[in-house]
Amino acid sequence: MTDPNIVRFRTIVAGALAQLEARRQEVNDLNVFPVADGDTGDNMVLTLRAVVDELDRLGADGNRTIDDIGRDDIVDAVAGAALLGARGNSGVILSQLIRGAAEELVSRPGELVDATLIGAALARAADRAYASVREPAEGTILTVVREMASRVAVELAHMPDPRLDPDSPSEIQDDMIASVLERAVAAGEASVMRTPDLLAVLRDAGVVDAGGYGLTIIFAGIVAALRGDEPPPLAHHAPARISHPHHASSTYRYCTNFAVIGQGLEPSRYVAALEQLGDSVLVVGDATTLKVHVHTDQPDHATAVFADAGEVSHLDVADMQEQVAERIARGEAQAVRCSVLAVVASRGIGELFESLGAHVVDGGPKLNPSTYELLAGIHAVPSEEVVVLTNDASVVLAAEKAAELSEKQVVVVPSRSQQTALAALVAYSPERSAQVNAQAITAALERVRGGSVAPAARDDAGGRFRAGDAVGFVEETLVAWGEPEQTLARVIATLGDGSELITCIAGADAPLASEHVAALVPGGLELEHRDGGPPTHWWLLSAE
């Protein structure tokens, strides 16, 4: 590094830890492979926290620099701390990523830590992680880190001058590394989204890989720390589906982790004996320190394998049956029988649907989501029964195809518009079945009429209005045009005839304030005014 202060290195690692801490439970809730003990986020946090603690120890004397301590000593200390602090499959694999990167840094003494060296370290980290697992599974953190490393290699190959002058300011160094890693984060996020295609247990549970997702969060935190800014945005992911609460690849009870300190240790020597006692075996480390992970019913027998090898320490035994039971209980407490998924044209109106308990799919301004976007939305909701509100006639065919493809029980309600569906959503009850909810919502829709006022997109062929004039509709019928106030008044009067309540959802560019809209409502008719309409309309209206 151009800045020899160890505090700078700690700031970067702490930034990664802070981001992972913030999403730790979300990572836990995705965990279904190799067993759904629900602690992937916890285990990755423990590994990173051990690294931060070691850096705190090394930097306790604020006058010591990286050069004073020595890069080799720092790298060895950090890799060792990650190894000893690791717990569970995810934590151990993360420790191997850290060790692999550290080994690359040690192999290049005196070389500036720039984007080229970071790329080489990430590639070595991926190799080390793959080598640590006896039977690597694609669709996991291993796949994600490999594809992140590949993206960095491509970026470096296309950079005109990826190396920095040794005297480059730290700000230039940080910016170049952050730019390359930001692209790695994007590649990692895309890889995470593909993990269900590679690992059937993820697809069945309706989740992405927890460890891979955790890794992208870590790197997003590194980018944020390098820039002193917010991290690159990452999509959030819904927990594992309630009907698939856990993956039964392991019949063993205890997740057992411990370290072995000795001399002349060979990781491969002990694997076969541990596999006689359980599964999910990992033995990693070097000739003096090993970290062992195994799922077994006999933790004491697992430690006994190393009786003549050295001193066993850092023993941690977790009851996976209790973890899974707690996770199921928490999921059932939060579970609903039926969810509603609504297609929306803007974030604002999506928030209105969400305030009434619905989930949403962004269909864009023209409300045209693909079948697979709808299918992803169906699988993301935390229930096995779903009612889909299309909110536009053009969405119905795609929604019906998504319902046909889904493993869930899905009922499509061909709602005519967002505003009428929003009014009818009061008939929804999460405790009822999808069929009963669909019938109730459909009945409510029959009691609601919709209308809208928007700026005309083009001149009327019949000469009634010009582009930019207000045009007002009741259902699909054009009833008014001209100035916004008169047009809105006419739509309200037409909709309000025989109604008790009219709801008006204003878009961001609506030309009349709410109090002005209220003055247009006839006496005896109650008005409910909301903001959040799509940018294509000034007002969306419904009457009931």
Image (spheres, helix red, strand yellow):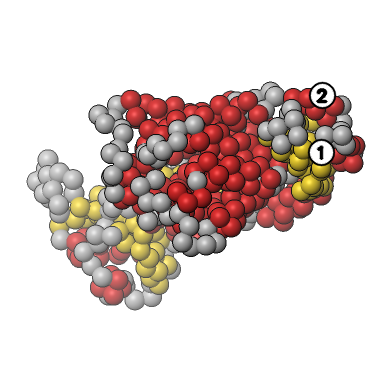
Work out which residue is located at the far left of the displayed protein and give it: 463
- Judge by depth and name the residue closer to the eye, 102 or 383: 102
Sooner in the amino-acid sequence: mark 2 or mark 1: 2
Q: What residue is at 74 percent from the left and 25 percent from the top?
A: 268
Element at label 2: helix
Which residue was labeled with disc 1? 310
Tell me the kind of residue under disc 1: Gly
- Where residue 202 appears, as percent x and y from the top left, is 63, 33
**Is residue 465 at least partly visible in the picture?**
yes
Marker count (numbered)? 2
Cα gap from disc 2 to disc 1, whole angstroms: 18 Å
Residue 533 quadrant = bottom left
Element at label 1: strand
Q: Is residue 430 above or below residue 213?
A: below
Q: What residue is at 31 percent from the left and 32 percent from the top?
A: 162
The C terminus sits in image quarter: bottom left
Q: What residue is at 19 percent from the left and 61 percent from the top?
A: 484
The N terminus sits in image quarter: top left
Tell me the kind of residue under disc 2: Ala
- Where residue 9 appears, as percent x and y from the top left, is 46, 51
- Judge by depth and name the residue closer to the eye, 516 or 168: 168
Residue 272 has which mark? 2
- Where residue 353 appears, as percent x and y from the top left, is 47, 56
Residue 178 quadrant = top left
